[in-house]
Image (spheres, rainbow, N blue to C red):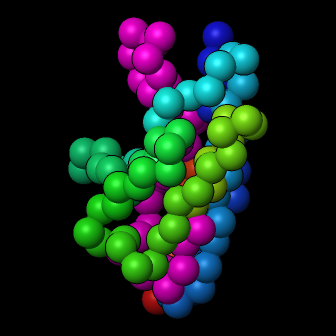
C-alpha cells in the first residue's frame, strides 16, 4: 500500500523560507504526478503545485515566483521550497500522488505551516 509522509512544516516569520519534503513508500513504480495542496479550516483544499515525471510543473497563481516544486523520480520524493512566505500561506500542507495504476489519489497526513506577521 502506498503511503506518503510529509515533513518540514513549522513556524516562520513573514518573508522567511521553509522546505517541505514528501516521501512515497510501498511501491516500486514511479508515481506519475506528485504535488502539494493546502487547506485552512473552513475552506476547501486548494492546489499549490504539482510536478510530473517529465518535470512539467503547475503552480497556483498565488505562489508563482515564490514556491518551487521539484522531485526525485527514482526515490518517489517531492520537495516544495517556499520562499518569501506570507501570513496567508498559513495552512496544513498535504502531499498528493497520482499513478496510472491507482483507482484514487494518494494523500499524506499533512504538515502545518504557520507564517507570523
Q: Position of residue 28 (x, y in %)?
A: 72, 17
Which of the 4 quarters of the picture holds residue 64? bottom left
Q: Quadrant of residue 90?
A: bottom left
Q: Tell me the residue at 35%/61% (across/down).
A: 59
Q: Specify start and end residues of the magenta stretch as a single range.
A: 81-110
Q: Could you tell me if residue 72 is visible in this image?
A: yes
In the image, residue 63 above or below residue 16: above
Q: Residue at x 75, y 37 (%)?
A: 75
- Regarding residue 113, the answer to whether it shows in the image is no
37 vs 101: above or below: below
Horizontal side of residue 81 vs 49, given as left or right: right
**View extreme (front): residue:** 54
56 within the magenta span:
no
Asked if residue 88 lies in the magenta stretch, the reply is yes
Instruction: Name the spot of residue 58 as percent of width and height, x first.
Output: 35, 55
Q: Residue at x 51, y 67 (%)?
A: 68
Residue 94, horizontal then vertical, whole percent: 49, 44
Q: Residue at x 54, y 80 (%)?
A: 83
Amino acid at each position: 500500500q502506498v503511503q506518503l509522509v510529509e515533513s518540514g512544516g513549522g513556524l516562520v516569520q513573514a518573508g522567511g523560507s521553509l522546505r517541505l519534503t514528501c516521501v512515497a513508500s510501498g511501491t516500486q513504480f514511479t508515481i506519475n504526478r506528485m504535488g502539494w495542496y493546502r487547506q485552512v479550516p473552513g475552506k476547501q483544499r486548494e492546489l499549490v503545485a504539482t510536478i510530473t515525471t517529465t518535470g512539467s510543473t503547475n503552480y497556483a497563481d498565488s505562489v508563482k515566483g515564490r514556491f518551487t516544486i521539484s522531485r526525485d523520480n527514482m526515490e518517489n520524493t517531492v520537495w516544495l521550497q517556499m520562499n518569501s512566505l506570507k501570513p496567508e500561506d498559513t495552512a496544513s500542507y498535504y502531499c498528493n500522488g497520482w499513478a496510472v495504476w491507482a483507482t484514487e489519489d494518494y494523500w499524506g497526513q499533512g504538515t502545518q505551516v504557520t507564517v507570523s506577521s
